Amino acid sequence: MEKQESMDDLFQMAKDLAKAERELKIEQWVEVTIYYGYAEKQVSLYHYNLPREMYFRYQWVIRWRMAKLQCQYPKQIVSTSLYFYDKRSGESMDVNGCLSKLISAKAQITKAERKMNEYIEHNRQNNMFFDENTDEELVKFREKLERKKIECAECEKRLELLVERRRNNQ
């Protein structure tokens, strides 16, 4: 039973993350650069800029291009670099990046709201003395959730300003 619950939790977390990305209008793209050389001596051979889903669907094209370039430059080690980003804002999708943290925070808020509603529903059915306005745990939880929502909204505003600045510079 535990494994099933943990799998359900993982699926729910993935749904929450996807919902947060939709709400933020994230357009996930990947920049693929095929190169040879190291550090300052890197020579860029080919460059792709495409939606993430297309990258995963057509990786064979990139492998084919790498093989062709490896044949053209047999004495070099041909490599690729990947840069995942949001096309709309230009922000990186790195795990420690601002955008990833915002998506994660929105997903955590969704999960917390769901847990809070489950708690309220459970107590309404099983505790006839339950009052959601005076329940200490629930009051504290709601205050903390409101602070988290405010922080998340401020971060969203900063993201929108970044998108606007990016549009105006183009």
Image (cartoon, grey):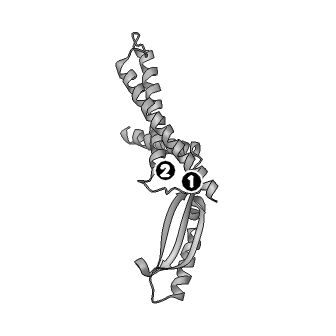
Q: Is residue 12 visible?
A: no
Q: Amino acid at mark 2?
A: Leu
Q: Residue 116: where, in percent of width, then height?
A: 44, 27
Give the residue displayed 52% in from the left and 75% down from the top: 34
Residue sitting nearer the eye, 46 or 149: 149
- Are discs 2 and 1 less than 8 Å apart at CB? yes
- Dot 1 lies on which element? loop
In the picture, measured across the screen, residue 48 lies left or right of residue 37, that is right
Q: Earlier in the sequence, mark 2 or mark 1?
A: 1
Residue 8 in the image: x percent, y percent? Answer: 45, 40
Q: Position of residue 53 (x, y in %)?
A: 58, 59
Viewer-closest of 6 and 34: 34
**How many marks overall?**
2
Q: Residue at x 63, y 54 (%)?
A: 168
Point 49% across, 35% down: residue: 110
For disc 2, the marked residue is: 99
Give the secondary structure at mark 2: helix
Query: At label 1, which amino acid type do we have?
Result: Ser
Above/below status of 43 relative to 155: below
Which quadrant of the rendered structure holds the N terminus? Answer: top left
Q: Splitting the image into 4 quarters, where does residue 76 fall?
A: bottom left
Seen from the viewer's position, the closer of residues 38 and 107 is 38
The percent position of residue 89, horizontal first and vertical second, equals 56, 53
Within the image, what quadrant is residue 123 found in? top left
Residue 96's place in the image compared with 140, above or below, is below
